[in-house]
Image: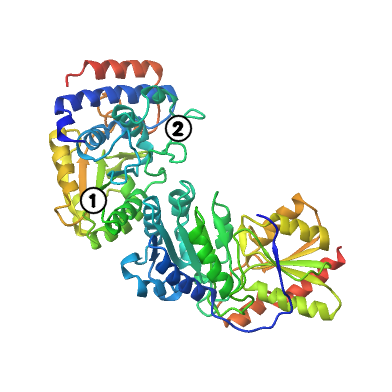
Amino acid sequence: MGTSTTVKTKFELKMGVATREAYGQALAELGKTNPNVVVLDADLAKSTYSAKFEKQFPERFFTCGIAEANMVGIASGLALSGKIPFASSFAVFLCDKGYDQLRMCVAYPHVNAKFCGSHGGISIGEDGPSQMAIEDYALMCALPGFTVLVPSDEFSGRALVKAMAEHSGPIYMRTGRPKAPIIYGAEDSFQIGRAKVHGTGNDVAIIACGLLVAQALIAQSQLEDEGISARVIDMHTLKPLDEPAVARAARECGAIVTAEEHVLEGGLGSLVAKAVALSTPVPMEFVGIQNTFAESGAPDQLMEKYGLTASNVVSAVKRVLKRK
Amino acid sequence: MTDRTAPSVDELKRIARRMRVNLVRMIGAAGSGHPGGSLSEVELLIALYFRVMRHDAKNPNLPDRDRFILSKGHGCPALYATYAEAGYIDSALLNTLRKLGSPLQGHPDKRILPILETSTGSLGQGLSIGIGTALAAKLDKRDYHTFVMVGDGEVQEGQNWEAAMFAGFHKLANLTCIVDNNRQQLDGFVKDILDPAPLAEKFRAFGWFAVEVDGHDFEQVIPALEEARTGKAGKPTAIVAHTIKGKGVSFMENNPEWHGIAPKPEQVQAAVQELEAAVV
């Protein structure tokens, strides 16, 4: 995978569009350049933003109704026939209802089909836990041969959707519902499996994905004011994990905090812990959802209540530094 | 297949007998497997591969080949035996069934046997995949047809009905679902476990053209498959093929015990004797 790329630090919070909207924008762009791209949805096209593709390429869009298992199977058949299907729904419905199909029809024959689960995590807010995917990428990382992506902002989202189309093999992308702070620009490039490293701090490394990358960057600034130098690693690709970036972080920083909007079991923290254990064992702390379903509420309230903010990252850094 | 080379029904019957002998022997040699549901689908597979489907064993990736998806993946010994008869694989491979390193895995595995359209084995999924290949044919303006074979126990899986609803609604005339209606499943008779009958009526209610045939009678099976392949119904076709699980081996017929166990050597010998003695 080569070395991870380092980008400028000093984070300013400026809102962009949601990663789910970036997905739809990128699909509509892909439709113009790649006639093999076809899109499927399970009655959530307006929410996943696949409707942006439908509007421009109705003949290449298949609405499957509320039937995720069938949709995944159809995507497999399209891929077996040379199409590049992108199938989307809420992450919890796509991954949980479609899991046997993702396993049998997609991962096992290793077909070139792409999937996007929107509304990842608890930041969807008021709709509550039945709609919140908190275990989706653990499930997807467990499927042999699957590539798993979690973009952190609209720029990384759009770039990674394009990378999905160019990559051969099954891929899952998780997107989020709320607007996401802008981290990158149009000039930044993204490669599957190659993390983005923010800053060169070497007291601690904060490895995050999705919305927690922005929180990690806020934490980085706060820590800097306290004289703690942190590097932030945007692990947009969970699988294959950028193990060299993790190993270097462990070696150079000697302490790692992971941060994610997902249960800790089988999530980013688990994947990083394995890579750390296999390279340079160092103390770790984990920010994530603690073995619980969330509840209805405003997204910001939920992120605070369930411990997924910059201040939770700062606290975890202070805990891990004591163990260094 | 072209009409010029199409074997006669008498020849097809001889192929069927040879395949049944091969099936019993290969499952016996494997020491495990599913003889009942393999023996029930023999005529359906032969009709497809020797009379109905457009395919070429010398060019298995022919873009316009008709697609066949064995959704009831446990019936794969019959598909492997068909591949051998049709010239896709060497008959010598059949006795490697289920052995380490064999391309003839316990359930179909496209990674190791690329001539398969896909891997199957978790019931209920083949029809959805077939919808995908049928939609791709329409997008690419190709005239190949997709045939999917499911079991009558398998249709208890709800995904079949999601797929049936989709295919009927979209009038996918280039898709055919063949139900190997052998009336048994692992735990016993389908009618006692969860009866999906009347199947043809159910498919019709989902917008399909549906016919019922004797699944062991080539004179009924071939015309039904050929008609389905024309797509003239303007909608997908379901062929409910009434079959006998364990067909041709009297001690296996209509005995659910033979869903998923292999015959012992003396049982293989008895079965082969019976099959070879039968008048075709």
The disc, 2 or 1, on the residue closer to the chain's N-terminal end is 2
Chain that bears disc 2: B
> Residue flagged by tag 1: what amino acid is it?
Asp
Of the 4 image quadrants, the one containing the C terminus of chain B is top left
Residue found at x 30% / y 59%: B139
Residue B92 or B201: which is nearer the viewer?
Answer: B92
> Residue flagged by tag 2: what amino acid is it?
Pro
User: Can residue A319 be seen?
Assistant: yes
Q: Secondary structure at mark 1?
A: loop
What numbered label is drawn on residue B103? 2
Is A136 situated above or below A309?
above
What numbered label is drawn on residue B143? 1
Judge the density around disc 2: few (<14), some (14-19), many (≥20) Cα neighbours within 10 Å.
many
Residue B206 at x, y percent in the picture: 23, 59
Is B265 situated above or below A260?
above
Chain that bears disc 1: B
Of the 4 image quadrants, the one containing the N terminus of chain B is top left
